[in-house]
Image: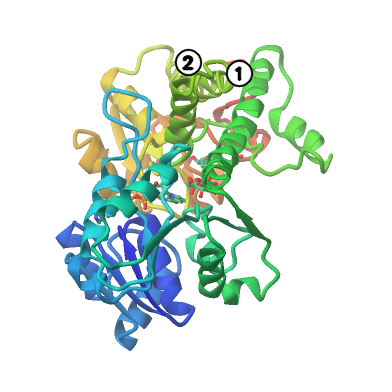
């Protein structure tokens, strides 16, 4: 079976390489020639653990190729996955579907192989698959049988390869048994490992994806709302999370309080869901997600407020080291990253911000070129009046007071991810603040 993947970003490049790993011949298609050049050389243009090795392996074996020319896959592919971006629309809160629409239209026009199946993987508002199904039927070439299915993706950046090869569930929305059977064939190896297979209609498949992300976002903002309370009355947010997490109906995962969620998925997906549901006339059903968003955004302001408190409300000209700029560890992705937001706010307030992230500096510099970027933790913290930890890379989680005390100008630390032992830092003479703990100055 020949497989094409349209869109070779974080999702598409991973999916293409993993499909090759499962034994298929794969072509990845993208409109970005630089991305395609890099992938064709076997080089991954972004950071994702384990993926460079897989891309290299299958480019070398000849099983994986990349092109900017859609017509190459039209006569060749049996299954075409759509993995292009669905970012937040500029100036609004809904999903921008122009890339999905453009990719589908140009793909459909190029397909000459009858019996091919187009499979949407991008995260889309409910109703998109049905609309695209009609578009496919209207625009397909004469004499060509073509169908469409929706197969949302649940991979996490940082674990993308593992999550694709060993997914915790597979969800497929189809309109015919033949389409479902074809997708079973694609995923036969994963299913051999007892992966739950959820076969459903288009609408459920689309909604499962955004429901999962909305639930995860809600869990994070739930604990962060309690962090606002413990910051005021005292108490320890991590102990609270541990204690409720022992109840396996609740579970401890995604209850880490801190500077909140970011990335290319959770923030835009909860906004797009609310927007879509309101469009459908159900203004109130997802209104709570607005509060989830607001709680999350307040966490970034709180991290900045803590920095101000530690510097006696005067940040102008003060050197502040910001450790971690990506939205989470093991990724170079800075889309809607809380750390980058915090760094930019401190810079805009007049601080001399020096950022260090093991993988994210390059992407962050494209968005905020005026921040200072350095290549090591040591350079970032040297002579700093304040250190702010915003992404919990292992390198930062392993820090001890002794590592920094001779480098900094003043022993002040904001741990905005609550990953360091506060008592130890305080005992070593640091003015040490976390989110979700009362700060007594
Ligand atoms: N990043 C993740 O972890 C993840 C996980 C699950 C689902 N998703 C969803 O997957 C989709 C893609 O996300 P991403 O993070 O990979 O985005 P991305 O921005 O990294 O990649 C999108 C790619 O699509 C390409 N593209 C745009 N228009 C195209 C066209 N007409 N033809 C061919 N290529 C085109 C872009 O050049 C880009 O390389 C989104 O809907 C996202 O919500 C992402
Ligand atoms: O307890 C927690 C857990 C996570 N986060 C933050 O939440 C964000 C998102 O984390 P995560 O969900 O691990 O990252 P993504 O790679 O964006 O993955 C999410 O978004 C993807 C795209 O839709 C989905 O496929 C995944 O299932 C879903 O977890 C990050 O900023 C984390 O720092 C917290 O603040 N506290």
The image shows residue 428 at horizontal and vertical percentages of 60, 36
Determine the CA span between mark 1 and mark 2: 9 Å
Q: Earlier in the sequence, mark 1 or mark 2?
A: 2
Residue 309: numbered disc: 2
State the residue at coordinates (52%, 47%). Answer: 202
Q: Are marks 1 and 2 in contact (CB under 8 Å)?
A: yes
Front residue of 339/278: it is: 278
Residue 439 is marked as 1
Q: Is residue 169 left or right of residue 80?
A: right
Q: Quadrant of residue 116?
A: bottom left
Residue 94 location, x and y as percent?
37, 29
Name the image colouring.
rainbow
**Label 1 residue SS:** loop
The image quadrant of residue 95 is top left
**Residue situated in front as seen by the camera: 416 or 378:** 416
Q: Is residue 243 above or below residue 38?
A: above
The residue that appears at 55% across and 36% down in the rendered structure is 417
* Quadrant housing residue 276: top left
């Amino acid at each position: 079976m020949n497989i094409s993947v349209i869109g070779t970003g974080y999702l598409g490049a991973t999916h293409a390489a993993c499909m090759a790993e499962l034994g298929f011949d794969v072509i990845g298609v993208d409109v970005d020639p630089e991305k395609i050049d890099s992938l064709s050389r076997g080089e991954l243009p972004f950071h994702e653990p384990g993926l460079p090795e897989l891309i290299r392996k299958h480019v070398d074996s000849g099983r994986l190729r990349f092109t900017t020319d859609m017509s190459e896959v039209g006569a060749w592919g049996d299954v075409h996955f759509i993995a292009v971006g669905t970012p937040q629309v500029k100036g609004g809160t809904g999903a921008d579907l122009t890339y999905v629409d453009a990719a589908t239209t140009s793909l459909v026009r190029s397909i000459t192989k009858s019996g091919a199946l187009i499979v949407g993987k991008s995260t889309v508002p409910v109703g998109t698959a049905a609309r695209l199904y009609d578009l496919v039927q209207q625009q397909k070439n004469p004499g060509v049988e073509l169908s469409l299915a929706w197969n949302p993706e649940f991979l996490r950046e940082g674990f993308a390869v593992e999550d694709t090869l060993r997914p915790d569930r597979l969800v497929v929305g189809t309109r015919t048994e033949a389409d479902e059977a074809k997708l079973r064939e694609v995923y036969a190896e994963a299913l051999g490992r007892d992966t739950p297979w959820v076969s459903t209609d288009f609408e459920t498949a689309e909604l499962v994806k955004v429901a999962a992300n909305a639930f995860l976002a809600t869990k994070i903002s739930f604990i962060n709302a309690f962090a606002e309370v413990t910051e005021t009355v005292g108490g320890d947010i991590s102990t609270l999370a541990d204690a409720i997490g022992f109840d396996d109906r609740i579970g401890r995962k995604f209850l880490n309080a801190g500077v909140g969620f970011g990335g290319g998925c959770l923030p835009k997906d909860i906004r797009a869901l609310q927007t879509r549901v309101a469009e459908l006339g159900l203004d109130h059903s997802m209104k709570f997600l607005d509060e989830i968003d607001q709680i999350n955004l307040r966490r970034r302001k709180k991290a900045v407020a803590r920095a101000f408190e530690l510097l006696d409300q005067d940040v102008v000209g003060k050197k502040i080291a910001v450790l971690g700029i990506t939205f989470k560890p093991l990724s170079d992705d800075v889309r809607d990253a809380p750390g980058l937001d915090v760094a930019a706010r401190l810079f805009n307030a007049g601080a001399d911000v020096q950022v260090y992230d093991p993988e994210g500096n390059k992407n962050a510099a494209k968005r905020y070129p005026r921040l200072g970027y350095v290549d090591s933790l040591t350079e970032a913290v040297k002579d700093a009046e304040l250190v702010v930890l915003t992404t919990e890379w292992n390198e930062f989680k392993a820090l001890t007071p002794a590592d920094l005390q001779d480098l900094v100008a003043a022993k002040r630390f904001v741990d905005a991810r609550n990953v360091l032992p506060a008592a130890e830092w305080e005992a070593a003479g640091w003015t040490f603040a976390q989110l979700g703990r009362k700060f007594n100055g």
